[in-house]
Amino acid sequence: MRNEVLKSMLRNGAVASIYFLLTYLLSGISYLGIQFRIAEILILLCFFRRDYTIGLTIGCIIANLISPLGLWDVLFGSIATLLSCLCISFCRQLFIATLFPIIFNGFVVGAELYFLLEEPFWISVGYVALGEAVVISIVGYIIFMIVGKRESFQRLIGATHNFNFKW
């Protein structure tokens, strides 16, 4: 049991670090309006293992510490990630799972941009949702459809469910 807890902590630490590094290295496209936060693809790991919610939320919190929106983004962006991860972790169809980050980030981060930057609400929601759709529902979906059913990938990430998922 202790071995499994340690493995989970190490996996989540690695995921949090990768999320932060991808966001930091691509910070020019990771924040504000139409954001293409490539690190968001990692959210789909929750489709295979629920406890990745922890690492992804921590990674998002750390990445949002350098956001131009400051602590507001730490709070609201991380809440959107947490809600997305929780919903994805109980989903049985990969494409449906890709829709949760679009909805949560679109509305939560879109509202954040509306209140903090006084951007038009529906334009902010649309831009954030568009970025999430491109990154997760197109790029992320294709990547996970290719590697997600491979036994070696499932072993690597310690998958606990959705081994033989459909679309």
Image (cartoon, rainbow, N blue to C red):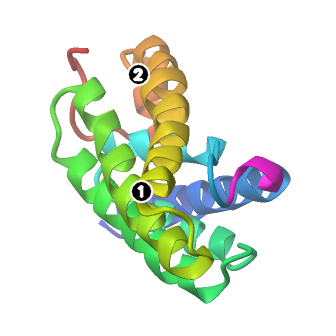
Label whose residue precedes the other's in the sequence (1 or 2): 1
Vertical relation: 163 (above or below) 57: above
Vertical relation: 40 (above or below) 79: above
Instruction: State the residue position of label 2.
Output: 148
Residue 100 percent location from the top left of the image: 29, 46
Query: Mark 2, residues whose alpha carbon is within 10 Å: few (<14), some, or many (≥20)?
Result: many
Which residue: 74% across, 75% down?
Answer: 68
Which residue: 49% across, 71% down?
Answer: 114
Which residue: 46% across, 34% down?
Answer: 133
Image: magenta residue range: 27-31
Which residue: 49% across, 79% down?
Answer: 115
Instruction: State the residue position of label 1.
Output: 105
The three-letter amino acid code for the residue at tag 1 is Asn
Residue 8 percent location from the top left of the image: 43, 60
Asked if labels 2 and 1 touch by Cβ distance under 8 angstroms, the answer is no
Q: Does 59 sit left or right of 78 as displayed?
A: right
Residue 42: in sight, yes or no?
Answer: no
Residue 82 percent location from the top left of the image: 36, 66
